Image (cartoon, rainbow, N blue to C red):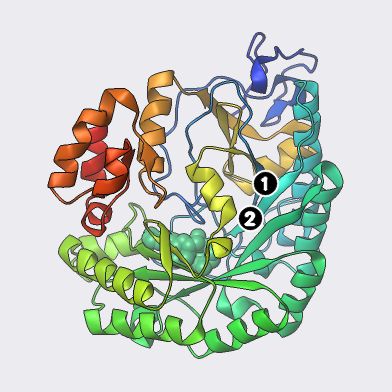
Amino acid sequence: MTASPRPGVPAPGGVPLTLGAPPTATPGVAVDGFLPQHPPREEGRRVGPHDGPHESPYRAGSGAEYGPDFGVYLHVPFCTVRCGYCDFNTYTAAELGSGANRSDYAATAVGEIALADEALRSAGMARREVRTVFVGGGTPTLLPAADLAAMLDAVDDTWGLAADAEVTTEANPDSVDAADLAALAAAGFTRVSFGMQSAVPEVLATLERTHDPERIPAVVGWARDAGLSVSLDLIYGAPGETLAQWQRSLEAVLALSPDHVSAYALVVEQGTKMAAQVRRGELPMPDPDDEADKYELAATMLADAGYDWYEISNFARTPADRCRHNIAYWRSDDWWGIGPGAHSHVAGQRWWNVKHPRPYAAAVAAGNLPVDGSEVLSGEDRETERILLGIRLADGLDVGATLADRLPQLVEEGLLEAAPAQRGRAVLTLRGRLLADTVVRRLT
Ligand SMILES: C[S@@+](CC[C@H](N)C(=O)[O-])C[C@H]1O[C@@H](n2cnc3c(N)ncnc32)[C@H](O)[C@@H]1O
Ligand code: SF4
């Protein structure tokens, strides 16, 4: 786990780092030696709030150039209970050790922000204002609003928030009330993403969600009253969910007119309680055909209600309602991920923090960046990732001269839109969105 500084490792922007601090027994790397070289680690699967990023953001590098935007992801690794399907880096104990306890966590995260700034400056990088902040989890709203505000203040004090910054927090519907949402808005949050998942009690029970679906209209109303933009997260394909139940969830979402909707297919992650239930035959494995039907239903109902897809799983009422933070991941912009297990990407290098909150907090307390590993993508890998991520966006992907001759066949098969393809851009049709992996394979 301990990563020692290594001489000669290029810093973001290609500026050699000066090494000063000695190797330490505390996990993490001294600021001067940040971004050690490690073998690549298995990448996160989902891309996005969950994923996201926070979900494990894992994006293509942009060479030695600065990405156009700089964002900050703040991970909050706590939940009251773990949902059976979830393998995110989250812990249910409130007491994890000094610095890692829920009550200490904001101060530790603020400590990492200071170390991040120091590392960027010692690597010769100019301060860039922060265009987007995304607080994800775990359940960020298990922390008092004042703690989330303190973390956001630290980002602002350190780098400066852009005047029009998008500042999102994820929230479980049963972890916030009207006063919390008002406090978050007053602190500078602009957006809240509620983990609704389903409107159907039986489906929520299968997913082991703790909230009552009747709470959703209440939290949406409170968020609106506070002036926050609202996103609702849905999962489709839970074991036993019928198409009619999924339709009910979509109708419930549309009745609330959120600004943004995410709809993700359930992934049965290895090592989760749900994976064990499926293995023992207690729950059926999600069926890809059923998931495809559900995606199509969602895409059609959302489009009919005026929500445009801008990424395969993400829909917005207007372009201004798109999640700019997630778009930055898909475009391989730069972001610093704060918190245990958080991933970062700056100027073509990416790295990830130690996963457990205890060694994470120990590293920060010792004045070390809590980095567990890092990598620099080869040009070929970067191109593959550019295709893998860019193809997911409704804006599509510029395929360049070498791949342009593959587009007509993909258009012929109904996977790509014809008009953009004539201009060398790959834009998925609805069928293409269902078969995006195939399109990627054909373009890589
Ligand atoms: C990690 S959660 C964090 C936010 C919050 N705790 C919640 O559950 O809403 C972010 C999103 O990822 C989704 N998610 C987690 N595990 C998933 C899985 N195995 N398949 C699909 N979506 C998943 C959650 O349902 C949630 O909407
Ligand atoms: S509440 Fe969210 S982060 Fe926590 S276990 Fe459930 S899905 Fe995972």
Q: Amino acid under label 2? A: Phe
Left or right: 142 with respect to 355?
right
| Residue 359 in the image, given as x and y percentages of width and height | 66, 40
Q: Please give the name of the residue rendered at 18% of the width and 67% of the height, measured from the top-left corner.
A: 281
For residue 190, say whether it is visible.
Answer: yes
Nearer to the camera, 76 or 301: 301
Mark 2 close to ligand 1, CB under 8 Å: no
Left or right: 328 with respect to 398?
right
| Residue 427 in the image, given as x and y percentages of width and height | 32, 47
Residue 238's quadrant in the figure? bottom left
Q: Amino acid under label 1? A: Val
**Circle 2 sits in a helix, a strand or a loop, which is it?**
strand
Which residue occupies the extreme top position in the image? Answer: 8
- Local packing at callout 1 (Cα closer than 10 Å; few below 14, some 14-19, many 20+) is many
User: Which residue is under mark 2?
Assistant: 134
Residue 72 - label: 1
| Residue 206 in the image, given as x and y percentages of width and height | 34, 76
Q: Do the residues labelled 1 and 2 touch (CB within 8 Å)?
A: yes
Q: Distance between the residues labelled 1 and 2?
A: 6 Å
Which numbered disc flags the more N-terminal residue, 1 or 2? 1
**Circle 1 sits in a helix, a strand or a loop, which is it?**
strand
Quadrant occupied by the C terminus: top left
